[in-house]
Image (spheres, helix red, strand yellow):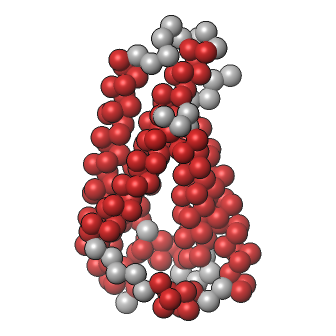
Amino acid sequence: MKLPAPILTILIFSIGFISGFIFINDFSKNYNGEEINQKLNIKFNFPTILLNNLKVIFLMLAGAITFGFSTFINLIFNGFNVGILIGSTFQTNEPLKLITALILPHGIFEIPAMLISAVAGFKIPYGITLYLLDKKEKPITEDDIKEFLKLALISIILIVIAAFIELYITPKIANYLLT
């Protein structure tokens, strides 16, 4: 049975997401979000957001040279974080309003960028595995490299758009919807 990279990517991310969603619902009984936010006091700017998100993208893409390990770990970790974020909104009276206000505007670019880079990160190891199983003539073809680079470029473009939206548009939507 062949499990294509996009299905594997979504499956791994979903495992992390469900784990984070369940974890936050159990953890939230002893959680004081306001206290944690005051301790963090993080200042956001475009370079900070972009560099943070690019790190995720490049760690996903690094799966091409770590035989998918960095991609796997980062999919679980980021799925877990998204699960916690979404799960924590369900601790409020209006979870869909919070998700729409704080996550959706930039998330519609950021999450696909992450998943696309993960597919790219699994692409080369998948080709090598097929070669080792005698199901492919060459471990890496020119088409494999072109597809990897195309997916990498698409994910980088999407993450730049997401960072811009996260800094300049999401706060405006959040202020409008939450006030």
Q: Nearer the viewer, residue 122 or 17?
A: 122
Residue 173 in view: no
Q: Nearer the viewer, residue 43 or 8?
A: 43
Q: What residue is shown at x 62% (from left), y 89% (from top)? A: 32
Give the number of marks: 0
**Above or below — where is 88 with respect to 141?**
below
Is residue 70 at all visible to an observer of this figure? yes
Residue in the picture at 47% in, 45% down: 60
The quadrant of the picture occupied by the N terminus is top right
Query: Residue 24 in the image: x percent, y percent?
Result: 66, 73
Q: Position of residue 141 (x, y in %)?
A: 40, 16
Position of residue 12 relative to residue 25, above or below, is above
Question: In the displayed structure, does residue 12 sit left or right of residue 43?
Answer: right
From what the image shows, is residue 147 above or below residue 120? above
**Most foreground residue, 78 or 108:** 78
Residue 9 image-quadrant placement: top right
Image coords of residue 114 (percent x, y): 44, 50
- Residue drawn 63% across the image and 23% down it: 2
Quarter holding the C terminus? Answer: bottom left
Image check: 90 left or right of 97? right
- The residue located at (59%, 38%) in the rendering is 8
Q: Where is residue 146, by image quadrant?
A: top left
